[in-house]
Image: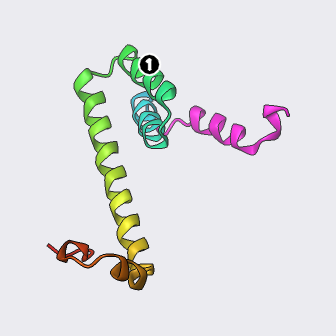
Amino acid sequence: MDAAEFTSIKALETAKAATELTERDKHLIGLAVTLTRGCQECSGSRIELALQSGLTYETVRAAIDLAAAVNAGVTLRTAISGSELFKAGIEQACSGSECGVGTP
């Protein structure tokens, strides 16, 4: 397999060359993507590169917090929607008041 065969490589090269996004924007977007994909090595590298490029620790930390919050929201929404699809089976398996999805 040759990496040049994949169209995603071209898309990445195009995105990297985009002048509409600043280098700061690209670092923060790249960090958010690697964090939400769960790649520890990629995320660590992105954090290091962002700091070396001049982003402050506070900015990087804020980006990490935002990515975590967004990812938590996606996880929660997916669980709620999934449980609504299989509500009958879940209600049968769970009998307590804590079983209600979206209820206090």
Name the foreground residue: 90 vs 44: 90
Question: Where residue 91 appears, x then y in whole percent?
Answer: 34, 81
The verdict on residue 15 being magenta is yes
Which residue reaches farthest right? 1
Q: Local crowd at mark 1 within 10 Å, few (<14), some, or many (≥20)?
A: some
Question: Where residue 30 appears, x then y in whole percent?
Answer: 47, 35
Name the foreground residue: 21 vs 85: 85
Quarter of the figure with residue 11: top right
Colour scheme in use: rainbow
Q: Main secondary structure of the magenta part?
A: helix
The amino acid type, in three-letter code, at marker 1 is Leu
Would residue 22 be found to the left or right of residue 60 on screen?
right
Question: Where residue 34 appears, x then y in whole percent?
Answer: 48, 36
Residue drawn 27% across the image and 75% down it: 101
* Quarter the N terminus occupies: top right
Name the foreground residue: 104 vs 89: 89
Q: Is residue 70 above or below residue 93?
A: above
Local SS, label 1: helix
Q: Which residue is mark 1?
A: 49
Would residue 13 be found to the left or right of residue 98 on screen?
right
Q: Is residue 45 above or below residue 74?
A: above
Q: Is residue 33 above or below residue 74?
A: above
Would residue 42 be found to the left or right of residue 77 on screen?
right
* Quarter the C terminus occupies: bottom left
Residue drawn 34% across the image and 43% down it: 67
Residue drawn 36% across the image and 50% down it: 71
The part of the chain drawn in magenta is 1-21
Count of numbered badges drawn on the protein: 1
Question: Where residue 35 appears, x then y in whole percent?
Answer: 43, 37
Residue drawn 21% across the image and 76% down it: 96
